[in-house]
Image (cartoon, rainbow, N blue to C red):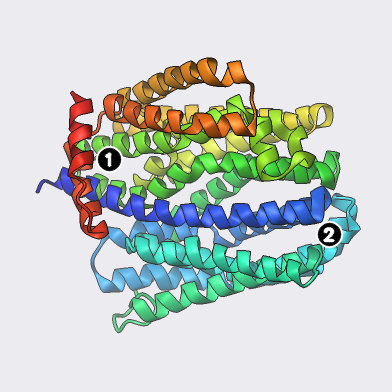
Amino acid sequence: MSDNETALETLLSGGSIVFLGLILQNLTTFVAKVVIARILGQRGIGEIALGVTILAFATSFVLLGMNTAVGRYLPRQDDQSFKRGVAVSALQIVLPISLVVGIALFVLAEPLATRVFDSPESATTLAIFGVVLPFAAMMRYAIGAMQGLKRSTAKVLIQNILFPVSRFAFVIVALVLGAEVVGVAGAYGLAYVLGGAVGMGYILRQSSLLTGEAEPTSMHRELVAFSLPAMVTASMLLIHRNIDILVVGYYASIDVVGVYDVVYTLATLMGLGLSAFGFIFLPVFSEAESDGRQNDMREVFAVAQKWVLIISLPPFLAFLLAPEVVVSLTFGPEYVTGSLTLSVLGIAYLTQGLVGLNGHALTAVGETRLLMYDALATAVANLYLNVLLVPRYGALGAAIATVGSFVVLNLLCSYQLHKRTDIVPVTKQTLMVATMSSIVTATIYLTLGATAGASTRNMVLTLPVFAVSYLVTIVRYGGITEVELAYLDDIEARLGRDLSNIRYWVRLLRR
């Protein structure tokens, strides 16, 4: 078996495992938000969204990019002293900083809520998230270590199953007991505590990174040199992706934050493919680059980006053609005012479906400084556009700003990836899938949807026609390779089912 086939099989098997975990994670997260939104209303979901966003910013800061550094450095050498040095040095940096910042957030919760967001009732919620900050940081650190060890299953079990399922369960219990916003925030906090404890427990018991006999090599200087740009990048990307929540909270009301958070949650469903393949893509691509296997790098990037797009397109088309139905069916009529905002956000996430792996690829080849500059430019653009548009257009202005910032980020990363590796981020396969899928969907919509009108009933009736047509389009125009087809053997073995009929039809449609 060639190195190219091995790299692709690692990507496909790891990506599929992570994807299944992400489906469960997003399903539980989504259902929990639906329940919170329907029971607590716009203001309640707005307060939770504000707290979670601030926690995300704080977690990114205290990690200092160490989770990314650990994920990148661990697979590059087999020496145990080196591996232990990476893990121990990163932990010695992250843990004390997370404790200090968590205490600061707890102490400053009231002035933040009162003076910045004009929402005094949010103070207790922010304080709760300050308490759980160290646990959130430890969970992210542990996930980075699992990524570097290529243990996709462990990552899925903790980040994509244990954490979201426990959060969902805690939220439901809190609401059943009659809890309001503070109780729901506490439920979120318990899930972070559990995720951080189990994640670190796994690293301690199932690896020798922190408890092995080999003397760890000090890696503080190397990790900081790599991770500081990564930390700035992560912080700027957080600004790029989350500053809209804070700006909407500042210029508008908590209720508008609630509506925006609801439609943004729907839009992020388009990122499932990128999250799944991005996790396993980074170490596979990094290993290929370290070994000088240029052809493997091109092939792995092309196949991964194609599947990211394939997973992203169906929700985008639903958000574009029937946003009112999607919002009403999920979160309820109270949030239908955000339908146009959802369509605009879908356009932003479509750019990720087309070229979103470019940032992961730049990280894998060590270009964290370039990514830092890209993220800085993107964050500045996003902040400027938000401040310009949100006071005038509210949540819709934030969505337009998000589109602009995504375009800026992906143009910069795509140009730099091509210059650094000679890889063209937009491949023939992705363009063909996007073009043919759009044509097929437009035909179905004009034939069935537009004539009957957009409604829940008509969407359900049209769905089977779209599903079959979309699958045929992927097989016929998606450039399915023999390695991808051979992966059916692995699926066949796991399911214990004969998939020869599927194999036959795929080969027939590929001709």
The residue beneath circle 2 is: 122
Residue 76 sits in quarter: bottom left
Residue extending furthest left? 1
Circle 2 crowding by C-alpha within 10 Å: few under 14, some 14–19, many from 20: many
**Image location of residue 436, percent across then percent down:** 38, 20
Give the left or right position of residue 116, taking residue 368 as reference. right
Residue type for callout 2: Ser
- Circle 1 SS class: helix
- Residue drawn at point x = 32 percent, y = 69 percent: 83
Circle 1 crowding by C-alpha within 10 Å: few under 14, some 14–19, many from 20: many
Disc 2 vs disc 1: Cβ atoms closer than 8 Å?
Answer: no
Residue type for callout 1: Val
Decide: is 95 above or below 117: below
Q: Could you tell me how far apart the alpha carbons at marks 2 and 1 are, in whole angstroms?
A: 46 Å
- Residue drawn at point x = 88 percent, y = 60 percent: 121
Q: Nearer the viewer, residue 123 or 478?
A: 478
On residue 300, the disc is: 1
- Residue drawn at point x = 71 percent, y = 65 percent: 129
**Image location of residue 418, percent across then percent down:** 35, 28
Q: Which of marks 2 and 1 is nearer the N terminus?
A: 2
- Circle 2 SS class: helix
- Residue drawn at point x = 85 percent, y = 50 percent: 117
Give the left or right position of residue 153, taking residue 505 as reference. right
**Image location of residue 139, percent across then percent down:** 52, 67
